[in-house]
Image (cartoon, rainbow, N blue to C red):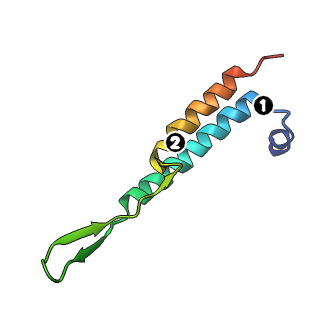
Amino acid sequence: MLGAVLTGKLFSDHVAFLGGAFFTAVITLAWGLKLRRTPGRLLVDPQTGQQVELKRRDAFMFIPVLYWAPIAVVLGLVLHFSHTRP
C-alpha cells in the first residue's frame, strides 16, 4: 500500500494537491494557535510604574501565521479543480 502511494499509482495528482493542502493547513493552524498562546513579557517603566506587554508578532508577508491555514485550503482547492482532467 505504501509503495502504491509513493509511486503515485494509488492517488492522482489532483488528490495529492488537495491532501497536501489540507495537511499543510492542519500543521499551520496548530503552529499558529501555539504561537498565539505564547505569553508576552511584561515590562514596567521604573519612573511612571506603567506596565507594557511585549508580544512577539508572528507573520509571513504581513499575514499572521494563523490565517495561512485557510489560504492553504483555498489554494489546494483551486489547484485541485483548475487542472484539466484527462
- The quadrant of the picture occupied by the C terminus is top right
Residue 25, picture quadrant = top right
Residue at the extreme left of the image, as rendered:
48
**Where 40 sits versus 30, above or below?**
below
Residue at the extreme bottom of the image, as rendered:
46
**Where 40 sits versus 32, above or below?**
below
Residue pictured at 39% horizontal, 56% vertical: 36
Looking at the picture, tell me which residue is in the foreground, 84 or 7: 84
Residue type beneath disc 1? Asp
Residue type beneath disc 2? Ala
In the rendered structure, find residue 13 and report the number of the disc placed on it.
Answer: 1
Work out whether mark 1 precedes mark 2 in sequence or the reverse, and give the earlier one: 1
Residue 85: percent from the left, percent from the top?
Answer: 79, 17
Residue 4: percent from the left, percent from the top?
Answer: 84, 39
Residue 77 as seen in the image, left or right of residue 36? right
Looking at the picture, tell me which residue is in the foreground, 83 or 60: 60
In the rendered structure, find residue 82 and report the number of the disc placed on it.
Answer: none
Looking at the picture, tell me which residue is in the foreground, 81 or 19: 81
Residue at the extreme front of the image, as rendered:
47
For label 2, the SS is helix
**Where 59 sits versus 23, above or below?**
below
**Where 60 sits versus 42, above or below?**
above
Residue ID for mark 2: 69
Residue 73 as seen in the image, left or right of residue 14? left
Few, some or many residues within 10 Å of mark 2 (<14, 14–19, 20+): many
Residue pictured at 67% horizontal, 21% vertical: 81
For label 1, the SS is helix
Residue 46: percent from the left, percent from the top?
Answer: 17, 83
